[in-house]
Image (tube, grey):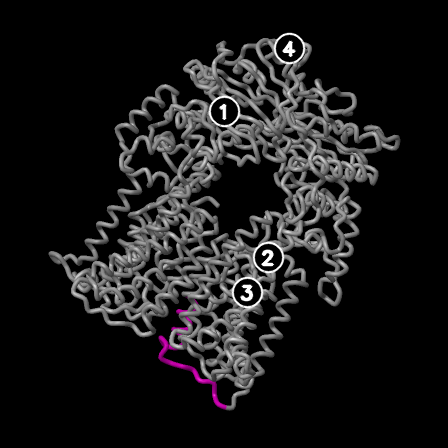
Amino acid sequence: MTITSLTTANPETPPPVFLPSRRDRILGRIQNQGAFAVLILVVVIASIGSPGFASGANILSILVGNAYPALLALGMTFVIISGGIDLSVGSVFALGGVLASYGASHGGILLALALPIVVAALIGLAQGLMVARAGMAPFIVTLAGMLFARGLLQAISHEGQTTYEVPAGSAFLKLGQGNWAPIVTVAVLFVLGGLVLARSRFGHNVYAVGGNENAATLMGVAVRRTKVWVYVLSAVLAGVAGLLNASSLGSGVTAIGVGYELTAIAVTVIGGTLLSGGAGSVLGTVAGVLLLAVIQNLIGQYISQYGSSASAAVNGAFLAVVVLLQTYLSRARRIT
Amino acid sequence: MTATAPGPDAGAPLLDVAGVGKSFPGVRALREASLALRPGRVHALVGENGAGKSTLIKVITGVYRPDSGRITLAGNEVSFDTPLDAQHAGISTIYQEVNLVPLMSVARNLFLGREPRRFGLVDVRAMNAKAAEILADYGVDIGVSGVARPLGSLGLGAQQMVAIARAIQLAARVVIMDEPTSSLERREVLTLFGVIRRLREAGIAVLYVSHRLDELYTICDDVTVLRDGAVVHTGELAELDRLRLVSLMLGRDMSQLRREGVTAFGEHDADEDVEPVLTAENLTIRPKLHGVSLKIRPGEVLGLGGLLGSGRSETAKAIAGGLKRDSGTVTVGGKRLRRGTSAEAVRAGVVMLPEDRKAEGLIPSLSVRQNIVLAALPRLSRFGLVSTTKQDEIVDYFVDRLKIKAASPDQKVSELSGGNQQKVLLARWLCLHPKVLLLDEPTRGIDVGAKAEVQKLIDEFAEEGLGVLLISSELEELIEGSDRVLVLRDGIAVAELTGAQVSEPELLRALASEPTAGIDGENADD
Amino acid sequence: MTSEVVAASGVDRARLLAWLRDYGVYAAIVLLVVVATSLHPAFLSVGNLRVQAFQLVPTLFVSLGMALVIATEGVDLSVGAVIALAASLIPLYLGYNAWIAIALCVVGGAIAGTVSGLMVAVAKVQPIVATLALMIGLRGVAVIFNGNQAKPVNDPVLGAIGLNSVGGVPIVVIAAVVVVLIVLFVVRRTTFGRQLVAVGDNRAASALAGLPVRRVLLTVYIVSGVLAALAGVLLVGHGAEADPATQGLNIELAAITAVVVGGTPLTGGRIRVLGTVAGALFMQLLSATLIQHDVPNSYAQMAEAVIICLAVYAARDRSGR
C-alpha cells in the first residue's frame, strides 16, 4: 500500500523530427556531390594557373585517355553499391583485349566481339556464384579471379611471348579508334548504366541488397540472383573495355591493366559511392573519373617522370580522406 | 471502445492457429499453442521472455515449420516456407527493428518490387508523388521532396510508419507487429495507434506484441497470454484487469500467493547507515531509459524489478559502460566514472554479468581457464607474460569454489552446460575482487541444481561485502534474493520496495500500477 | 538400420572435416613432397631446398603478420605496398649505413601499420577499406622515392642477409625460425596473445570484459606493417636490387592464402601459427613443383587461384556460417 512513487523524469519528449534537419541535408549533399564540387574547383584553378590545361587538345586527350578504363569504374559502381568489391577487373580488362585481338586475327569481327564478352561473362558468373551462393568473401574470390584471368591471358599469349595483332583493314579496328569513337561509346554505356542503376528494378534491387541484405530478402528481392548479375555485369564491362582498347591499339597487349582495379575502386569511392554498400551513383563515378583524370593530367604536366606513380599516391590519399569523411558523415547523419 | 467493433464471436477467425507445437533441441518452445485472429480486431500477444511469443510469430510467418498443429488463413490450411510466402498470402510482419533499407529513399523503400514504370523504366516522379500521398495518410507528411530522401534520415517512428505503410500496401489481411513501439518516442506511438485504429476499421486483423501494459489497454481488443510455450489465457482484454494480466504472465495465482521459499537465498541485512559503494544518478539512454537513479551499499542486494523491456538491462549496462549514456553520473567509492567505458568500470571494480551469455560474455574458442582469467590477465602478468602458476592457482580456486564442472580447465568453454558457463563468467569477475556485481538474469537458462548454487553464491558474495544489483524476471528470485527492490516501468523508476514491502503482492501491484502520465487519455477521441 | 549407418557416416564426415582443417595442410605437404620427389629425385636436394627457402621466407614473414590481423577478424591488403616502401627507402639511406636503412624500413612499416590500425581501431573503418587506401597509395609514393627504374643494391650487409648461410643454413631461414618462435610465443604465452583471439572471436564480450580492444587492433596492424617491411629488406637483399614497382606485388594474396590454407578462418577468433607456416610452405612447394615440371607459369597461377577458392570454401564450412 505504501509504494513510494519515484517518477523522476518526464517521459514527454519533443515531437518527432520527420524531416531531415538542415545540417543533415548539407552533410548529405557533401556525400553525394562533393566530388563534383572538388572537380569544378580543380578545373577552375587549373584553367587559371596552367595555361595549357584548358586547351581543346588537352581536354580531348584527358577524355580519350581515360575513356576505356572508366568502364571498369562503371561496373565497380554496381558491385560496390551491392556491398561487394571486384578486384579482378584489371586482369579481365587485359584478358578482353588479348581475346579480342586473338578473335580478330583468327575469325574476324564477330569472334573478336563474342570471345571476350563470353569469357568475361563466365568469369563474372563463377565469381558471382561463389560470392552469392557459397557465401565466400568477395575480396578474396575476386583476388583469385584476378590471378586466374591473368594466368589465362598469359597462357593464351604463350607466357606473353605472342602478341596477337588485329589484321590491318579489319572492321574491328573501326570500333575503337579515333578521338570521338571512344568518347561516344563510353558516354553511351555510362548513360545506359546510369539508367539501369537509377531507374530499373534491377538497379533498385542492387541498392537494397547492399543497403540491408536481410531487409532486402524480407522485401522480396532475389538477393542471390542480383549479386550474381552484378558480378557478371562488372566482368562483361571490363571485357568490353579491354576489347575496345585492343581495337584502338590494334593489338592485345598482355602487360596492361595491372592495378586498374584499384584505380576503379578509388574513383568510384571518391565519387561518393559508399564502400560499405547501399549508396552511390553513376554520376558520382563520372565525377570521380574526371577528377582523377584531371589531377593526373596536371601532375603529368609538372612531374611527367613519375606521372602514374604520383597519381597512384594521390588516389590512395584521396581514398583515405574520402573513406574517413564518409565514415564521419554516415555517423553524423546516423545512417548506417 | 467503438460501437462498430464486433465482439469476439462475430465472424470466423481470419487466421486460426490450432494446437501448434515446436521443439528445439532441449527445449519445447511451443506446446499446443492456439491463437485466433479476427478481422477488425487488435489482438495482444503477451508473455515474459521465453514464453514462446517470437517462436509463435515465426511459425505463423514461415520462418519455422511447426512440429504439429495447423494454421488456416481465411478457411484454407496454409504452410509457408519463407516470410515472403506469408507476405504474398497477405500476412505482413512489422519487426521490432525496422527492416527496411536506410540508405534508400523513402519512396523506393515503400515501392521496392512494385515500382510504377513507364517505357520500361521506373517512373520516379509518379512513385514519389504516390509515396507522398500514401505516407501523408499515415501521419508522415513529408511531401514529394521528403520521400526522395534516404529513409535513414527520418526519425525511427516515421521509419516504422513507412514499414507499416509498406506492409499494408502489400494488400495485407493480417498485420503482425512485433514490439513496434520499443524504440519509438511517445508522440510516434500515438501516431502508430491512429494507424492501427484505421487498420481495425478497414477490417484487417492485427496481432500486437508488446510488454507495455499501458499500450495494450489503449489499443487492443483481445489478448492471448503465453507462458512456457503454452496459452494460459485468451479472451477479451477489457475483462482482464492489469493485476490479473501481470499475474498470468508471471504465473502467479493471486488467490493463493504465498512465500514458497523455493530459492536458495538466505536472509541478510544491510546496514542502512553505511555509505553506498555505488551511486548512479539520473541515468538516461533515450528512448529506453529516463533518469533512473539508484544506490547500492556494500553487502546489499538491490533488486531491479520490471517487465521485459522496462529498462532493467539498460540500467545495468549504463552503469557498467556497456551502453553509452546520454546523461547521468555513476560514482563508485566516491570517485566518478567519467569516460563511461567498460574498461573504466572494470578498473573501478564494477563488473556486469550480461543477460546474453553467448553474445556478450563468453569467448567460445578459448578454454575454461582462459575465459576465467581473461579480464584479470594484466594483473597476472609481468611484462606481458602470463604467469601460469598464478593463473592456475586462481583457476583452481574458483573452479573448486564455484563447483564448475568441466572435464578439465582446458576444455573449451563452449562445450560446457549453460550453468557452468555462467559460473565461468562469474569466476572471471570474482577473481578481480570487484566492489559491485551487476547480475542480469544470472540464472536464466541454467538447470535447477546450478541455479540454486548460483543463488547461494550471490548470497555469499553479498555477505562478504560486495554490492550486488540483481535483475531477474523470476519473482521468487528477485524477492528472496533482494534486500530492496527498485521497480522500473518504461524506463522510469516507479517504485522502491523496502523491508516488508519486498513481497510478491507489492511487487505485482507496482508492476501493474496505472501510469502517472498515461496515454489512456488519448482514447477519448476514438 | 540404414539411418544409423547414415548418421554414423555423418559423424565421420564431420570428424574428417575437422581433421582436414587441423592437419590437412601437413598431409598435403607430405603428399606433395612424395609425389614431387618420385617424379624428380632432385626435389629434395639441398640445393633445391635452399632455393625454395629463399623464396619462401619473405612470404612467410608477411603471412605471419597477416595471420595476426586475420585472427582479429581483419585483413591487411597494404603489405605489398609496404614492401615497396621498404624497397624504396633502402637505396635512399644505404649511404649512411645498412643498419640505419633497415631501421628506417622498420619505422616506415610501423607508420604504415599505425595508419591502417588507427583507421580500423579508432575510426572503425572496415579493415579491407582502410588497408586498400594504403595499398593503392603507398606503392605510388615508393616509386616516386625510388624513381621508375630498379636500382642495384650492392651492400655487403644486405647481401649477406639475403644470400649468406651460417653452417649451411641460410640466414633468412634462421631469421624466419626466430620470427616464427617469437610469434608462437606471443600467441601462446602472453596477455596480448589471449586478447588477440578474444577480440577476434567476440569483440562485444571482449569490450565488456574491459579488454583494450583498440590497442590490440592497433598493435596487430603495426606488427603486420613491420613484418612486411622486414620482408621487403630480405627481398632487396636477396635480389640485390630495389624495385618498388614490382617487389611484393600480389604478396597479400599469397599471404592470405597461406593463412587460410593453414587453418585460420577469415572470420577470426582463431590463429594457427604453425599452420600458417605450413600453408606458406605448401603454396611455395606447389608452384615450384609445377614449374619444375615445365608447367607454364600461367597454368601454375590458375591452379593457385583454384586452390585459394577451394581453401576459402572449405574454411567457410568450418566456421559454421
**Image height check: is B378 above or below B473?**
below
Residue A154 in magenta stretch = yes
Q: Is residue B60 visible?
A: yes
Residue B371 in magenta stretch = no
The subunit carrying tag 1 is B
**Dot 4 lies on which element?**
loop
Rendered location of residue C214, percent (x, y)? 41, 43
Q: Which residue is mark 3?
A: A232
Q: CA distance from mark 1 to mark 3?
A: 52 Å
Q: Is residue C113 left or right of residue A121?
A: left
Residue type of the residue flagged with mark 2: Ala
Check if mark 2 and mark 4 are on a common chain. no
Q: CA distance from mark 4 to mark 3?
A: 68 Å
Quarter of the rendering containing residue A182: bottom right
Rendered location of residue A301, percent (x, y)? 45, 78
**Residue C261 numbered tag:** none
Q: CA distance from mark 2 to mark 1?
A: 42 Å
Quadrant housing the C terminus of chain B: top right
Rendered location of residue B187, percent (x, y)? 73, 37
**Residue A279 numbered tag:** 2
Residue type of the residue flagged with mark 1: Leu
Q: Which residue is mark 4?
A: B257
Q: Residue at x 74, y 27 (%)?
A: B518
